[in-house]
Image (cartoon, helix red, strand yellow):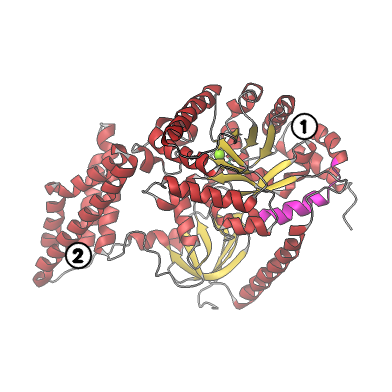
Amino acid sequence: MDSKQDPQILQGLGVSPGVAIGRAVCLSIHHLEVYRIPIPAADVDAEVARLRDATQQTRIELEATRKRAHEQLGDGLAGIFEAQSMLLEDASFVNRVEERIRTEQVNAEWAVHKVSEEFLDRFDNLESEHLRERGDDLRDVTRHLLRVLQGIAHHELSELGSDVIIVAHDLTPSEAVRLGRQRVVAFAIETGGPTSHTSIIARDLNIPLVTGLDGVADLVTDDDPAIVDGTDGIVILHPLKGQLAEYAGRRKRQGEQEQRLLETGSLPCVSRDGVAIQLMANIDLPEELDDASRFGAAGLGLYRSEFLYIERAPELPTEDDHVSTYRRFLDSMSPHPVLIRTFDLGGRKLAREVMATDEENPVLGLRGIRLTLARPHIFKTQLRGLFRAGVGRNLWIMLPMVSARDEILAFRAFAAEVMAELDREGIEFSRDFKLGIMIEVPAAAMIADVLAQEVDFFSIGTNDLIQYSLAVDRNNEHVSYLYRPLHPAILRMIRFVLDCARDSDVEVSMCGEMAGDQRYTALLLGMGLRRLSVSPRSIPEIKNQIRGLEVSGLAEATERCLTMGSAAEVERCLDSYLARQEPLT
Ligand code: PEP
Ligand code: MG
């Protein structure tokens, strides 16, 4: 694979560890590559006919999607596809494209691309927000039409070869899921922070990911040989033979290290001085269940159920899909608990598809429990599935993005209606589950004493808690240096939540990525946390860390850390304590 070109080393953020060697496939360019190809006068009619066929085909596809969306999600979402279809009916758009093909004698793709640009310019300059929003529809429909013209099926990824390194400007969590299941060995993208959902998915799938690679999508050409080092955040384009050999060696050593850690799977999760810690798994994709069992997870501390939807979008999972998925999890983890979080849709996760509106600031918008309470037809199906799946099983239901007590009360009232309906239908279901909430909004953390009166358990979601408390977008690589789990504000909030949980006898765990980072294990145990939920692949490392710690001395050291005024001081304080610990022999 040694390349004729000089090697080029790019430094980004390593957000999913591991080394991969392969060849680049540029995602964004594949999707929208449009060339200007002159057409002989004799072929112009055929080119116009090709455009008409593609337009018709796009309409048929949009109509099918609209129908499905209407049946499953109601009018709101269906409206998007209807609006897109209408743009294709609009004679001013289609006629203008045909005119360009004829007058300029160019290919249909180029004409569509140029006319769309013309229209978008007009939309972007409009005063009316409503009309400006039509710009998004035009962008989507143009992409769709271009894909049809280019003969690339919608989301068709199956032609990928082996050892593929996906290079893109951006990658959504659902794209990461779909690509990760193909023969993709690494991702190299421009945007995203360590706790973005795309990064979490890459770690779930054990695929190295480097983000923050400014301009990488323009720099790389398809089939360029490359190395991705997701541990150190490095991408090497056109590597030399020596570099290839060095990284192949690293990859081998990492595999061996993983193997050694795996052997701890069956060891008890107990600290050096005998304190038992419950180490559970976070699951996003059903295939992670095997890893959770293999690595000895004592239950699931978070199932992000929205991924059930993300995988099927725009179709919603049926009630039976919910029942069978949840039962599978509950049965395979029995007798341990399984915490199923109700849909945390909205924010960046499929806001547009489910809500049919664009939000100015979706992360502060209709997301999580706010969205599900506002869309009872979607929520009811999920709750019926949960209540049915819970019969005779250790089910814990968890609500995301709770910011006020009223949301818990509203949930209870709605759940009672759903149960009454199941009762009337004579369907067997469980009332015997635990109800809990994510503590991931600062307001919830600050009233943890009040919320503790309403629920059986808390799970601290540091990914959002840090984002909202420190005003640092978790998806934004430019501010990721400010995303500091050890910030004193975060530690004080965690401490307060733990105190409130203890005082009210409420169970508490942590499922944010902070729990899966071994640098923080000592501090979390020192603060009194005894239940952690981490991605399955992090279990061996965290268990190993726990087995090496003396928990008895940690409380005092943690107290000192909590008096520090900055994340850097906390880190120094913690490091100096741990350096004085006797090493494990
Ligand atoms: C969190 O916010 O910490 C969390 C676990 O939820 P998510 O990452 O899905 O937002
Ligand atoms: Mg969250």
Quarter of the render that holds ligand 1: top right
Q: According to the image, label 1 marks what residue? A: 562
Please give left or right for residue 211 compared with residue 555 in the image: left
Q: According to the image, label 2 marks what residue? A: 107
Name the magenta segment's main secondary structure. helix
* Quadrant assignment, res 149: bottom left
Q: Amino acid at mark 1?
A: Leu
Secondary element under disc 1, as helix, strand or loop, is: loop
Confirm if mark 1 falls within 8 A of ligand 1. Answer: no
Q: Residue furthest front?
A: 426
User: The C terminus lies in which quarter of the figure?
Assistant: bottom right
Look at the image and give the residue range highlighted in magenta: 537-551
**Along the viewing direction, whichever of 38 and 443 lies nearer the viewer:** 443
**Label 1 neighbourhood size at 10 Å, few (<14), some (14-19), many (20+)?**
many
- Residue 321 drawn at (x, y percent): 45, 49
- Residue 338 drawn at (x, y percent): 61, 44
**Along the viewing direction, whichever of 113 and 361 lies nearer the viewer:** 361
